[in-house]
Image (cartoon, coloured by chain):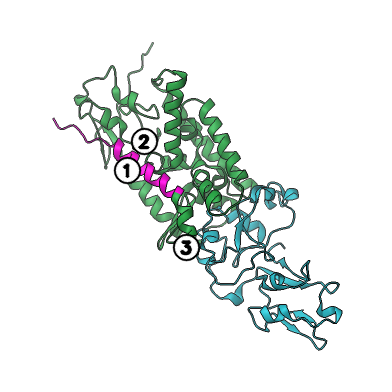
Chain colours: A cyan, B green
Amino acid sequence: MKASRRGLFPALCGRVPLRPPGARPEPEFAALCIRCNRCITACPYKTLKPASWIYGERAGTPLVVPRKIPCYLCMACPPVCPTGALDPITDKRAVRMGLAVVDPESCFAHQGILCRTCVDECPLEGEAIYQDGELKPVVTEKCVGCGVCEKVCPVAEPAIVVRPRGDQ
Amino acid sequence: MNKPRRWTPLRRSVQLAVALLYLVLPFLNRWGLRGFMGNLASLKVGPVDLLEPAVALSVVLAAGKITASLVLALLPVVALAVVLGPVFCSWVCPWGLLSEGLDYLKIRTLHLHRTWTADGYRKLRPLRMAALLVFLLASSVVASPLVALLAPPRLVTALPQELFYLSVRPVVTGSVLLLWLLAELFLPRRWVCRALCPVGALWNFLRLPWTLQVRFEPTLCVDPKVAPCHLHCPWGIDPRSMGRFDGCTNCLRCVEGCPSTALRAGFGKPMDPPVRTKKVST
Protein backbone atom coordinates (compact mmCIF):
# COMPACT_ATOMS: atom_id res chain seq x y z
CA MET A 1 0.00 0.00 0.00
CA LYS A 2 2.82 2.33 0.93
CA ALA A 3 4.46 1.68 -2.43
CA SER A 4 1.27 2.18 -4.43
CA ARG A 5 0.68 5.56 -2.82
CA ARG A 6 3.87 6.78 -4.46
CA GLY A 7 2.18 6.83 -7.84
CA LEU A 8 1.07 4.70 -10.73
CA PHE A 9 4.48 4.22 -12.33
CA PRO A 10 7.09 4.92 -9.66
CA ALA A 11 9.76 3.16 -11.69
CA LEU A 12 9.07 5.24 -14.77
CA CYS A 13 9.05 8.54 -12.97
CA GLY A 14 12.73 8.45 -12.15
CA ARG A 15 14.10 11.26 -10.02
CA VAL A 16 11.57 13.49 -8.35
CA PRO A 17 11.55 16.89 -10.08
CA LEU A 18 12.26 20.17 -8.36
CA ARG A 19 8.90 21.61 -7.35
CA PRO A 20 7.74 25.26 -7.13
CA PRO A 21 8.14 27.16 -3.84
CA GLY A 22 5.74 26.09 -1.12
CA ALA A 23 5.20 22.62 -2.59
CA ARG A 24 4.05 19.92 -0.17
CA PRO A 25 6.34 16.88 0.19
CA GLU A 26 6.31 14.70 -2.88
CA PRO A 27 3.71 11.90 -2.57
CA GLU A 28 1.27 14.43 -1.16
CA PHE A 29 2.05 17.00 -3.85
CA ALA A 30 1.23 14.58 -6.67
CA ALA A 31 -2.06 13.74 -4.93
CA LEU A 32 -3.07 17.37 -4.46
CA CYS A 33 -2.02 18.81 -7.84
CA ILE A 34 -4.92 18.95 -10.31
CA ARG A 35 -2.87 20.21 -13.28
CA CYS A 36 -4.89 23.41 -13.55
CA ASN A 37 -1.70 25.16 -14.79
CA ARG A 38 -2.43 28.21 -12.67
CA CYS A 39 0.98 28.33 -10.95
CA ILE A 40 2.65 27.91 -14.33
CA THR A 41 0.57 30.76 -15.75
CA ALA A 42 1.30 32.96 -12.73
CA CYS A 43 5.08 32.58 -13.08
CA PRO A 44 6.41 35.80 -14.69
CA TYR A 45 9.83 34.26 -15.48
CA LYS A 46 8.52 31.15 -17.25
CA THR A 47 10.44 29.14 -14.66
CA LEU A 48 7.64 26.66 -14.09
CA LYS A 49 6.99 24.10 -16.78
CA PRO A 50 4.53 21.18 -16.87
CA ALA A 51 6.20 17.77 -16.49
CA SER A 52 6.34 15.91 -19.79
CA TRP A 53 4.80 12.50 -20.49
CA ILE A 54 7.90 10.60 -19.32
CA TYR A 55 6.86 11.46 -15.76
CA GLY A 56 3.94 9.03 -16.15
CA GLU A 57 0.88 10.03 -14.18
CA ARG A 58 2.78 13.07 -12.89
CA ALA A 59 2.73 14.58 -16.38
CA GLY A 60 1.40 18.13 -16.25
CA THR A 61 2.55 18.82 -12.69
CA PRO A 62 4.75 21.93 -12.37
CA LEU A 63 8.51 21.61 -12.13
CA VAL A 64 11.63 23.78 -12.20
CA VAL A 65 14.68 23.08 -14.34
CA PRO A 66 17.10 25.53 -12.71
CA ARG A 67 19.86 25.23 -15.32
CA LYS A 68 17.36 26.57 -17.88
CA ILE A 69 15.45 29.09 -15.75
CA PRO A 70 15.84 29.12 -11.95
CA CYS A 71 13.21 30.32 -9.49
CA TYR A 72 13.62 34.02 -8.67
CA LEU A 73 11.51 33.67 -5.51
CA CYS A 74 8.94 36.29 -6.58
CA MET A 75 6.38 34.17 -4.68
CA ALA A 76 3.66 34.68 -7.30
CA CYS A 77 2.76 30.98 -7.61
CA PRO A 78 2.04 29.73 -4.05
CA PRO A 79 -1.09 31.89 -3.47
CA VAL A 80 -2.78 30.87 -6.75
CA CYS A 81 -2.87 27.13 -5.97
CA PRO A 82 -6.52 26.14 -5.40
CA THR A 83 -5.93 22.81 -3.63
CA GLY A 84 -3.09 23.52 -1.22
CA ALA A 85 -0.52 21.51 -3.21
CA LEU A 86 1.49 24.72 -2.78
CA ASP A 87 1.33 26.21 0.71
CA PRO A 88 0.41 29.91 0.31
CA ILE A 89 3.70 31.22 1.71
CA THR A 90 4.92 34.71 0.82
CA ASP A 91 8.26 34.78 2.69
CA LYS A 92 11.03 33.67 0.36
CA ARG A 93 13.14 32.56 3.32
CA ALA A 94 10.47 30.02 4.25
CA VAL A 95 10.81 28.26 0.89
CA ARG A 96 12.24 24.72 1.02
CA MET A 97 12.33 23.58 -2.61
CA GLY A 98 15.70 21.89 -2.41
CA LEU A 99 19.23 22.15 -1.18
CA ALA A 100 22.23 23.14 -3.31
CA VAL A 101 25.06 20.62 -3.32
CA VAL A 102 28.61 21.52 -4.44
CA ASP A 103 30.64 18.95 -6.37
CA PRO A 104 34.25 19.42 -5.18
CA GLU A 105 35.53 17.46 -8.21
CA SER A 106 34.47 20.10 -10.73
CA CYS A 107 33.97 23.32 -8.70
CA PHE A 108 36.51 25.95 -9.83
CA ALA A 109 36.98 27.29 -6.29
CA HIS A 110 37.88 23.80 -5.11
CA GLN A 111 40.57 23.62 -7.86
CA GLY A 112 42.17 26.83 -6.62
CA ILE A 113 40.66 28.98 -9.39
CA LEU A 114 39.18 32.21 -8.09
CA CYS A 115 35.40 31.93 -8.65
CA ARG A 116 32.59 33.20 -6.44
CA THR A 117 29.76 33.40 -8.97
CA CYS A 118 27.34 31.29 -6.93
CA VAL A 119 28.04 33.22 -3.72
CA ASP A 120 27.60 36.56 -5.50
CA GLU A 121 24.38 35.64 -7.28
CA CYS A 122 22.60 33.90 -4.38
CA PRO A 123 19.39 35.86 -3.70
CA LEU A 124 19.77 35.24 0.04
CA GLU A 125 23.04 37.24 0.10
CA GLY A 126 25.43 35.33 2.29
CA GLU A 127 22.80 33.47 4.33
CA ALA A 128 22.49 30.39 2.15
CA ILE A 129 26.01 30.13 0.75
CA TYR A 130 29.28 31.68 1.92
CA GLN A 131 33.01 31.33 1.26
CA ASP A 132 35.06 29.53 3.87
CA GLY A 133 38.67 30.40 4.78
CA GLU A 134 39.94 28.69 1.61
CA LEU A 135 37.42 30.65 -0.53
CA LYS A 136 35.40 27.49 -1.22
CA PRO A 137 31.60 27.82 -1.35
CA VAL A 138 29.73 26.30 1.59
CA VAL A 139 25.95 25.81 1.50
CA THR A 140 24.05 26.34 4.77
CA GLU A 141 20.68 25.03 5.96
CA LYS A 142 19.16 28.43 5.01
CA CYS A 143 19.40 27.44 1.31
CA VAL A 144 15.90 27.47 -0.22
CA GLY A 145 16.78 25.61 -3.43
CA CYS A 146 15.88 28.32 -5.94
CA GLY A 147 18.62 27.14 -8.30
CA VAL A 148 20.09 30.52 -9.22
CA CYS A 149 23.56 29.14 -8.32
CA GLU A 150 23.02 26.15 -10.61
CA LYS A 151 22.00 28.53 -13.41
CA VAL A 152 25.03 30.85 -13.09
CA CYS A 153 27.74 28.24 -12.40
CA PRO A 154 30.38 28.76 -15.14
CA VAL A 155 31.34 25.06 -15.22
CA ALA A 156 29.89 23.34 -18.33
CA GLU A 157 28.24 20.60 -16.24
CA PRO A 158 27.19 22.76 -13.24
CA ALA A 159 29.37 22.08 -10.18
CA ILE A 160 26.54 23.17 -7.89
CA VAL A 161 23.13 21.52 -8.33
CA VAL A 162 19.88 21.66 -6.39
CA ARG A 163 18.63 18.40 -4.89
CA PRO A 164 14.86 18.45 -4.26
CA ARG A 165 14.04 18.29 -0.56
CA GLY A 166 10.49 17.14 -0.97
CA ASP A 167 11.29 13.50 -1.67
CA GLN A 168 11.81 12.00 1.78
CA MET B 1 -51.05 31.44 -25.44
CA ASN B 2 -47.49 32.65 -24.95
CA LYS B 3 -44.85 30.45 -26.50
CA PRO B 4 -41.82 30.16 -24.20
CA ARG B 5 -38.65 31.81 -25.51
CA ARG B 6 -36.06 29.92 -27.52
CA TRP B 7 -33.14 28.97 -25.32
CA THR B 8 -30.83 27.21 -27.76
CA PRO B 9 -29.39 30.36 -29.45
CA LEU B 10 -28.47 31.73 -26.03
CA ARG B 11 -27.05 28.38 -24.91
CA ARG B 12 -24.99 28.01 -28.09
CA SER B 13 -23.64 31.53 -27.61
CA VAL B 14 -22.55 30.71 -24.07
CA GLN B 15 -20.98 27.41 -25.14
CA LEU B 16 -19.15 29.04 -28.03
CA ALA B 17 -18.01 31.94 -25.86
CA VAL B 18 -16.50 29.52 -23.34
CA ALA B 19 -14.83 27.47 -26.07
CA LEU B 20 -13.49 30.63 -27.71
CA LEU B 21 -12.27 31.95 -24.37
CA TYR B 22 -10.18 28.83 -23.87
CA LEU B 23 -8.73 29.14 -27.35
CA VAL B 24 -7.79 32.79 -26.74
CA LEU B 25 -6.79 32.47 -23.09
CA PRO B 26 -3.28 31.07 -23.75
CA PHE B 27 -2.50 34.13 -25.87
CA LEU B 28 -3.91 36.51 -23.25
CA ASN B 29 -1.77 34.80 -20.60
CA ARG B 30 1.22 35.05 -22.91
CA TRP B 31 0.71 38.82 -23.18
CA GLY B 32 0.85 39.03 -19.42
CA LEU B 33 -2.89 39.26 -18.75
CA ARG B 34 -3.32 37.02 -15.74
CA GLY B 35 -6.68 38.17 -14.38
CA PHE B 36 -8.18 34.99 -15.79
CA MET B 37 -6.22 31.78 -15.49
CA GLY B 38 -6.57 28.05 -15.20
CA ASN B 39 -8.68 25.45 -16.98
CA LEU B 40 -11.96 23.72 -16.18
CA ALA B 41 -10.38 21.82 -13.27
CA SER B 42 -9.91 25.13 -11.51
CA LEU B 43 -10.25 28.75 -12.54
CA LYS B 44 -9.19 32.05 -11.11
CA VAL B 45 -11.36 34.91 -12.31
CA GLY B 46 -9.95 38.08 -10.81
CA PRO B 47 -9.94 37.40 -7.07
CA VAL B 48 -12.48 34.58 -7.27
CA ASP B 49 -11.26 31.01 -7.00
CA LEU B 50 -13.35 28.29 -8.61
CA LEU B 51 -12.87 24.54 -8.28
CA GLU B 52 -14.75 21.79 -10.05
CA PRO B 53 -16.63 19.65 -7.43
CA ALA B 54 -15.72 16.19 -8.79
CA VAL B 55 -12.08 17.26 -9.10
CA ALA B 56 -12.15 18.52 -5.51
CA LEU B 57 -13.63 15.26 -4.23
CA SER B 58 -11.01 13.32 -6.17
CA VAL B 59 -8.22 15.42 -4.61
CA VAL B 60 -9.60 14.97 -1.09
CA LEU B 61 -9.70 11.20 -1.56
CA ALA B 62 -6.26 11.05 -3.21
CA ALA B 63 -4.52 13.18 -0.59
CA GLY B 64 -6.60 12.06 2.38
CA LYS B 65 -7.01 15.63 3.60
CA ILE B 66 -9.10 18.75 3.06
CA THR B 67 -7.50 22.17 2.75
CA ALA B 68 -9.21 25.49 3.48
CA SER B 69 -8.40 26.93 0.03
CA LEU B 70 -10.06 23.91 -1.55
CA VAL B 71 -13.32 24.38 0.34
CA LEU B 72 -13.32 28.11 -0.37
CA ALA B 73 -12.90 27.57 -4.11
CA LEU B 74 -15.57 24.88 -4.10
CA LEU B 75 -18.35 26.91 -2.49
CA PRO B 76 -19.34 29.20 -5.42
CA VAL B 77 -19.45 26.26 -7.84
CA VAL B 78 -21.55 24.08 -5.54
CA ALA B 79 -23.88 27.06 -5.01
CA LEU B 80 -24.29 27.40 -8.78
CA ALA B 81 -24.94 23.66 -9.14
CA VAL B 82 -27.52 23.66 -6.37
CA VAL B 83 -29.41 26.65 -7.79
CA LEU B 84 -29.22 26.09 -11.55
CA GLY B 85 -28.66 22.32 -11.73
CA PRO B 86 -26.06 20.61 -13.96
CA VAL B 87 -25.84 23.57 -16.38
CA PHE B 88 -22.08 23.00 -16.52
CA CYS B 89 -22.61 20.12 -18.96
CA SER B 90 -25.07 21.78 -21.31
CA TRP B 91 -24.10 25.47 -21.12
CA VAL B 92 -20.39 25.62 -20.25
CA CYS B 93 -18.28 22.54 -20.97
CA PRO B 94 -16.57 22.72 -24.39
CA TRP B 95 -16.55 18.93 -24.50
CA GLY B 96 -20.34 19.08 -24.28
CA LEU B 97 -20.40 21.32 -27.35
CA LEU B 98 -17.99 19.01 -29.18
CA SER B 99 -20.05 16.00 -28.15
CA GLU B 100 -23.27 17.57 -29.43
CA GLY B 101 -21.56 18.30 -32.74
CA LEU B 102 -20.20 14.77 -33.03
CA ASP B 103 -23.61 13.32 -32.21
CA TYR B 104 -25.16 15.42 -34.96
CA LEU B 105 -22.52 14.27 -37.47
CA LYS B 106 -22.89 10.67 -36.35
CA ILE B 107 -26.61 10.74 -37.02
CA ARG B 108 -26.27 12.55 -40.33
CA THR B 109 -23.51 10.32 -41.75
CA LEU B 110 -24.49 6.96 -40.30
CA HIS B 111 -28.23 7.60 -40.68
CA LEU B 112 -28.87 6.35 -37.20
CA HIS B 113 -32.44 6.26 -36.05
CA ARG B 114 -32.91 9.63 -34.39
CA THR B 115 -35.33 8.59 -31.70
CA TRP B 116 -34.38 7.24 -28.31
CA THR B 117 -35.66 4.16 -26.57
CA ALA B 118 -38.45 5.15 -24.23
CA ASP B 119 -36.81 4.33 -20.90
CA GLY B 120 -33.13 4.17 -21.89
CA TYR B 121 -32.14 7.24 -19.93
CA ARG B 122 -33.26 5.72 -16.67
CA LYS B 123 -30.99 2.71 -17.11
CA LEU B 124 -27.97 5.04 -17.34
CA ARG B 125 -28.39 6.37 -13.82
CA PRO B 126 -26.65 3.42 -12.08
CA LEU B 127 -23.92 3.48 -14.74
CA ARG B 128 -23.31 7.18 -14.12
CA MET B 129 -23.15 6.56 -10.38
CA ALA B 130 -20.75 3.62 -10.92
CA ALA B 131 -18.47 5.70 -13.17
CA LEU B 132 -18.23 8.41 -10.51
CA LEU B 133 -17.53 5.87 -7.77
CA VAL B 134 -14.88 4.07 -9.82
CA PHE B 135 -13.08 7.37 -10.53
CA LEU B 136 -13.19 8.37 -6.86
CA LEU B 137 -12.17 4.97 -5.46
CA ALA B 138 -9.33 4.69 -7.97
CA SER B 139 -8.17 8.21 -7.01
CA SER B 140 -7.91 7.06 -3.43
CA VAL B 141 -6.13 3.80 -4.27
CA VAL B 142 -3.45 5.27 -6.55
CA ALA B 143 -3.22 8.54 -4.56
CA SER B 144 -3.69 10.63 -7.67
CA PRO B 145 -6.62 12.94 -8.52
CA LEU B 146 -7.82 10.88 -11.49
CA VAL B 147 -10.90 13.01 -12.15
CA ALA B 148 -8.58 15.96 -12.79
CA LEU B 149 -6.25 13.85 -14.91
CA LEU B 150 -8.80 12.05 -17.07
CA ALA B 151 -12.15 13.86 -17.20
CA PRO B 152 -12.92 15.55 -20.56
CA PRO B 153 -13.66 19.11 -19.25
CA ARG B 154 -10.11 19.72 -18.01
CA LEU B 155 -8.46 17.90 -20.90
CA VAL B 156 -10.29 19.83 -23.57
CA THR B 157 -9.44 23.18 -21.96
CA ALA B 158 -5.86 22.18 -21.10
CA LEU B 159 -5.07 21.27 -24.70
CA PRO B 160 -4.96 24.87 -26.04
CA GLN B 161 -2.96 25.89 -22.95
CA GLU B 162 -0.36 23.23 -23.66
CA LEU B 163 -0.25 24.02 -27.37
CA PHE B 164 -0.16 27.82 -27.30
CA TYR B 165 1.21 28.83 -23.91
CA LEU B 166 3.14 26.11 -22.16
CA SER B 167 4.87 24.90 -25.33
CA VAL B 168 4.95 21.25 -24.32
CA ARG B 169 3.95 18.39 -26.56
CA PRO B 170 0.43 17.48 -25.37
CA VAL B 171 1.16 13.74 -25.40
CA VAL B 172 -0.85 12.70 -22.34
CA THR B 173 -3.69 15.21 -22.79
CA GLY B 174 -3.91 14.46 -26.51
CA SER B 175 -3.99 10.68 -26.18
CA VAL B 176 -6.58 10.61 -23.39
CA LEU B 177 -8.74 13.04 -25.39
CA LEU B 178 -8.40 10.76 -28.40
CA LEU B 179 -9.69 7.86 -26.31
CA TRP B 180 -12.73 9.91 -25.26
CA LEU B 181 -13.26 10.86 -28.90
CA LEU B 182 -13.23 7.20 -29.93
CA ALA B 183 -15.64 6.39 -27.09
CA GLU B 184 -17.90 9.17 -28.35
CA LEU B 185 -17.84 7.68 -31.84
CA PHE B 186 -18.26 3.99 -31.06
CA LEU B 187 -20.36 3.90 -27.90
CA PRO B 188 -24.10 4.65 -27.95
CA ARG B 189 -25.15 8.27 -28.44
CA ARG B 190 -23.65 10.83 -26.02
CA TRP B 191 -22.41 8.11 -23.68
CA VAL B 192 -19.28 9.96 -22.64
CA CYS B 193 -21.39 12.78 -21.22
CA ARG B 194 -24.40 10.75 -20.18
CA ALA B 195 -22.74 7.79 -18.54
CA LEU B 196 -18.96 8.02 -18.20
CA CYS B 197 -17.95 11.57 -17.28
CA PRO B 198 -17.49 11.80 -13.48
CA VAL B 199 -17.75 15.59 -13.57
CA GLY B 200 -21.25 15.58 -15.04
CA ALA B 201 -22.27 12.74 -12.75
CA LEU B 202 -21.48 14.72 -9.62
CA TRP B 203 -23.17 17.89 -10.93
CA ASN B 204 -26.22 15.75 -11.55
CA PHE B 205 -26.24 14.33 -8.03
CA LEU B 206 -25.93 17.83 -6.51
CA ARG B 207 -29.58 18.53 -7.38
CA LEU B 208 -31.83 19.48 -4.47
CA PRO B 209 -35.66 19.35 -4.54
CA TRP B 210 -35.82 23.11 -5.24
CA THR B 211 -33.05 23.22 -7.86
CA LEU B 212 -34.05 24.67 -11.26
CA GLN B 213 -35.69 21.92 -13.25
CA VAL B 214 -38.10 21.29 -16.08
CA ARG B 215 -41.58 20.53 -14.81
CA PHE B 216 -44.50 18.98 -16.58
CA GLU B 217 -48.14 19.98 -16.38
CA PRO B 218 -49.98 16.96 -17.86
CA THR B 219 -53.27 18.81 -18.39
CA LEU B 220 -51.60 21.18 -20.89
CA CYS B 221 -49.84 18.45 -22.91
CA VAL B 222 -51.25 18.43 -26.44
CA ASP B 223 -49.16 15.73 -28.08
CA PRO B 224 -48.49 12.89 -25.58
CA LYS B 225 -48.16 10.26 -28.32
CA VAL B 226 -45.49 11.92 -30.48
CA ALA B 227 -43.86 13.70 -27.53
CA PRO B 228 -41.69 16.25 -29.38
CA CYS B 229 -40.03 17.04 -26.05
CA HIS B 230 -38.60 13.54 -25.82
CA LEU B 231 -37.35 13.75 -29.43
CA HIS B 232 -35.68 17.10 -28.78
CA CYS B 233 -33.75 16.09 -25.68
CA PRO B 234 -30.05 15.76 -26.59
CA TRP B 235 -29.72 13.08 -23.92
CA GLY B 236 -32.86 11.12 -24.78
CA ILE B 237 -34.65 11.97 -21.55
CA ASP B 238 -38.41 12.10 -21.42
CA PRO B 239 -39.09 15.28 -19.41
CA ARG B 240 -42.65 14.16 -18.70
CA SER B 241 -41.57 11.31 -16.48
CA MET B 242 -38.01 12.04 -15.42
CA GLY B 243 -36.93 11.93 -11.80
CA ARG B 244 -34.56 14.32 -10.11
CA PHE B 245 -31.38 12.30 -10.80
CA ASP B 246 -32.21 11.07 -14.29
CA GLY B 247 -29.51 13.21 -15.88
CA CYS B 248 -31.33 16.32 -17.13
CA THR B 249 -28.80 19.14 -17.59
CA ASN B 250 -31.30 22.00 -17.92
CA CYS B 251 -30.45 22.73 -21.56
CA LEU B 252 -34.16 23.62 -22.01
CA ARG B 253 -34.40 22.13 -25.50
CA CYS B 254 -37.54 20.24 -24.45
CA VAL B 255 -39.14 23.45 -23.19
CA GLU B 256 -38.68 25.19 -26.52
CA GLY B 257 -39.66 22.02 -28.41
CA CYS B 258 -42.94 21.73 -26.58
CA PRO B 259 -45.83 22.91 -28.78
CA SER B 260 -47.81 23.98 -25.72
CA THR B 261 -46.78 25.31 -22.31
CA ALA B 262 -46.93 21.95 -20.58
CA LEU B 263 -43.20 22.09 -19.92
CA ARG B 264 -41.54 24.95 -18.12
CA ALA B 265 -38.43 25.40 -16.03
CA GLY B 266 -38.81 26.61 -12.49
CA PHE B 267 -37.52 26.52 -8.94
CA GLY B 268 -39.29 25.00 -6.00
CA LYS B 269 -40.71 21.59 -5.48
CA PRO B 270 -42.31 19.91 -8.51
CA MET B 271 -45.97 20.71 -8.88
CA ASP B 272 -47.02 17.07 -8.75
CA PRO B 273 -45.33 13.80 -8.05
CA PRO B 274 -43.59 13.00 -11.36
CA VAL B 275 -46.01 11.42 -13.78
CA ARG B 276 -44.66 8.06 -14.82
CA THR B 277 -45.34 6.67 -18.27
CA LYS B 278 -47.81 3.87 -17.92
CA LYS B 279 -46.33 0.43 -17.66
CA VAL B 280 -48.29 -2.42 -19.21
CA SER B 281 -49.00 -4.83 -16.41
CA THR B 282 -49.57 -8.41 -17.34
Secondary structure under the numbered disc 1 in the rendered image:
loop
Give the mark nearer the N terminus: 2 vs 3: 3
Give the mark nearer the N terminus: 2 vs 1: 1
Task: Please check the rendered image and state whether residue B8 is part of the magenta-colored stretch, yes or no.
Answer: yes
**Magenta segment boundaries in residue numbering:** B1-23
Q: Are marks 3 and 1 in contact (CB under 8 Å)?
A: no
| Foreground disc of the pair 2, 3 | 3
User: Considering only vertical position in the picture, is A75 above or below B10?
Assistant: below
Q: Is residue B118 visible?
A: yes
Whole-angstrom CA distance, mark 2 to mark 3, is: 44 Å
x, y percent for residue B73:
44, 57
x, y percent for residue B119:
40, 22
Q: Residues within 10 Å of mark 3 (few under 14, many from 20)?
A: few
Whole-angstrom CA distance, mark 3 to mark 1, is: 39 Å
The disc at residue B223 is none
Circle 1 is placed at which residue position? B211
Discs 2 and 1 carry the same chain letter: yes
Give the mark nearer the N terminus: 3 vs 1: 3
Q: Is residue B64 visible?
A: no
User: Considering only vertical position in the picture, is A8 above or below B249?
Assistant: below
Magenta segment, prevailing SS (helix, strand or loop):
helix
Circle 2 is placed at which residue position? B244
Q: Are marks 2 and 1 in contact (CB under 8 Å)?
A: yes
